[in-house]
Structures are given as C-alpha cells and as structure tokens.
Image (cartoon, rainbow, N blue to C red):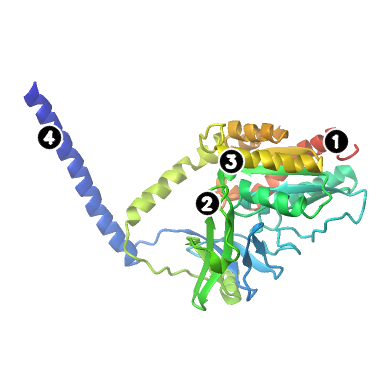
Amino acid sequence: MKNKLLKFLINTVLVLLSVFIAYFLVEVVYSWLYVKKIIKPVETLWFHEVTDPGGNFKYDTVAGYRISQTPARYGAVLSDGTLESIGVLKGNNLGFPDKRDFEPQKNNPQLKRIAVFGDSYTASQFTDRSWPDIAEDKINGLAYDSVVFMNFSVDGGGLANWHSIIRNIILGEGYQIDAVIFAVMGDDLDRKFMWKNDYRQNASDKKLAFNYLGNWQQKKAAGFEDVSEVMYMQNYLILDSVQIDAIEKGTWSYDRQRELKPYLYEALKKALRQINFPKIFRNKQHGSTPSVFEPEQAALIKDLSDAISEMQVPVLTLSLYTNENRCQAFAAMMHAAYLSDAGFRQSLETIEEDKIYIKNDGHWKQEGAALYAEYIYKDIYKWMAEKRVIEQ
C-alpha cells in the first residue's frame, strides 16, 4: 500500500514537473518572439491629446481631478491602428464632464436639476454623447424641456469621490438640486478616493499618473507634488495633435518598447477574460461581493445618506453590470429607489459585442451608451414623476 502511494506521488510530481518545464520553455520562446516583435498581438490603447500645458487632468483634493476646459480628443485605438472610439475630453467651469457650466443657483426656477454620479460609463467623454445627455433629451421630449442632468461623474472613481463631491461642492457650496442619481458600475462601491494627473517628465515621456488612497479615511495630499505613492496608467498614451490626426486618418502605427517579461502568461489571462466577457457583461452580475460593507465604508455611505437628507431630495440608484445584492444594499442605506439593468443586459444578447463594446476592454462605444439611454430614460422619467420632481 505504501509503495503504491509513493509511486502515485512520484508520478504526480513528475507530471507536474513536466507540465511546468513545458510551460517554462514555451513562455521563454513566446516572450522572446514578443520582445523581438515577431509576435504582434493586438492591444487596446487609451489616449488623450495634449492641449493644455497645465495638464488636461489636474489633481484635485475634492473631486480627485478636474478636467481642463481646453478641448482634447480622447478615446481608444487598437495597436494595429483601428480606431475604436473617440470623443472630446473637456471639463466645464468646475472641471466635470458636462457640456454646461455649473452654478449653485438656478437661473430658471422651473428647471429641474438632477445631479448624476457615475464612473467612466457615465462620464463617457470617449464617445460623442454620454447616456445622461441622450436620456436628458428623451426625457425633455416628455417633460417639456424642464430637466437638466448635471454630470458629476468621475472616470475611474466611485463611492469615495462621490461622497467628497456631494459634501464639499453640492452641499458645501449650496447647490440647488432637485434629485440625485447614482449609476453604480462594477466595483464602484468599493473604490476608495481616486485621483489622476497628467505627468510629463519631459517632452518624450508622457504618462497619466493615478492612484487610489489606501483606506477610506486616508488624508489626501495637498497637491500632486506631495503625493507619496504614484502609479501610471498602463496601455495609456498622451499624444500630440499630429499623432491623433494620424489615428483619425488611419495612418498611425504603434511601436511599444518591449521589456522582457512573461508575455504568454499575460496573453493567457487576457484570453480567459475574453472567454468570460459575454458572461460577465451580459448575462451575469459583475463579481460576487456580499451585500455587507466594511465598517469605514458603511460609515461613509451613512454620511453620504445624511448629506443628501440635508438636501431633502429623492435618490435613485441604477445598477450597471454590478452585483445586484450589493447595489440594493447601498440603495437601501441611501433610502433610494432602485432600477436594475437585468433587462438591459438581456436585450443585448442578440447584438454583436463589437458594435457595443471597445475591443478587449468592455467600455461602451457610442452604440452602447445610446442603447442604455433608450432602455432607462422612461423608467427615470416615471420615477421623477412619482417623486414629484416633475409634473406629468
């Protein structure tokens, strides 16, 4: 019996060792071919145009960053030169992704101002129009041009950024708001305070710096120069106007400086994500996080709810490719109405992914934003009417 067990263990070790050696050899060959640019897999690259010498993304302790008012092209392109999506990166007077400037007081008492919070899916400046812009137009077709969606979304941000903006700007500066909408995507509720900043060490070294604070109550650096921990956005390019002209003309090419590292491992991870992509972004909820929150996170949500209670306005929570149990728990803590995206995800099953999503990425192209706006605007209108934000 002992001999059989020993033989089994030896055989198992030999098999595992053989598999490891085979993988190691293939990894070495694949990575060498990749570094030598014999293998050229197609990558998805994000980019924005340099148009503001002071930075198109500027570090900010309240919002995380402010977007420059100087327009810049912003989008996603494949490494083979195929343009996936492009829009205009431009902040309003407060540096938020909205075509209108924000002022604390209404200039028209009849106007209903809805503060909208989300992440990149709701900011969506890499498309021609965001879903809030499209939904606003459709709702105003029903509500006689009486509704304005104020887009306070933070591309890359989430809960902590939303809390900071509401406490310090909307409530702190006395903004007249009639309702609040949270569009919760993916892990937005688990995102601690996030910041961005254009980083230019010299003319040839252009990077987008960013990071998330380590905990919910961590003190923010007063300025970018005081930040102690900096990360740089991967697969992100800061380009000049000539380069982006070439992207739009289809004449641009990308030649990455390739350092030696395990590229086969990275390729396998990407392939697995691609296999799971339809399941994650169409048929299933994103993640399996339980509905409970960390104590400091729950305290932040409670304070966010208290802040909105002071404003005495109704709240709506929208789920977007996220864990619905967790999103519903957030809505309950916010005393908010809740709208699921389950029907929306089901409606996409017959549509080709390449028409909706940026390749290898998952962000919406213009078609995806338009489809979601079409799906959700009537439900938002109905909720506003029920809460007497607008009169039917």
* Dots 3, 1 in contact, CB < 8 A: no
- Report the residue marked by disc 2: 361
- Report the residue marked by disc 4: 10
List x then y, in percent, for residue 365. 62, 52
Q: What numbered label is drawn on residue 297?
A: 3
Which residue type does callout 2 highlight? Asp
Quadrant containing the C terminus is: top right
Could you say which quadrant of the image residue 9 lies in? top left
Callout 2: SS:
loop
Q: Is residue 38 visible?
A: no
Instruction: Indicate which label's residue lies in the foreground, 2 or 1.
Output: 1
The mark that comes first in sequence, 2 or 1, is 2
Q: What is the C-alpha distance between the residues marked 2 and 3?
A: 28 Å
Would you call the spot at circle 4 few (<14 residues within 10 Å), some (14-19), or many (20 or more)? few
Callout 3: SS:
helix
The mark that comes first in sequence, 4 or 3, is 4
> Which residue sits at x=82%, y=38%?
384
The mark that comes first in sequence, 4 or 2, is 4
Callout 4: SS:
helix
Q: What is the C-alpha distance between the residues marked 3 and 1?
A: 32 Å
- Report the residue marked by disc 1: 385
Instruction: Indicate which label's residue lies in the foreground, 4 or 3.
Output: 3
Q: What is the C-alpha distance between the residues marked 4 and 2?
A: 43 Å
Q: Is residue 370 visible?
A: yes
Which residue type does callout 4 highlight? Ile
The mark that comes first in sequence, 2 or 3, is 3
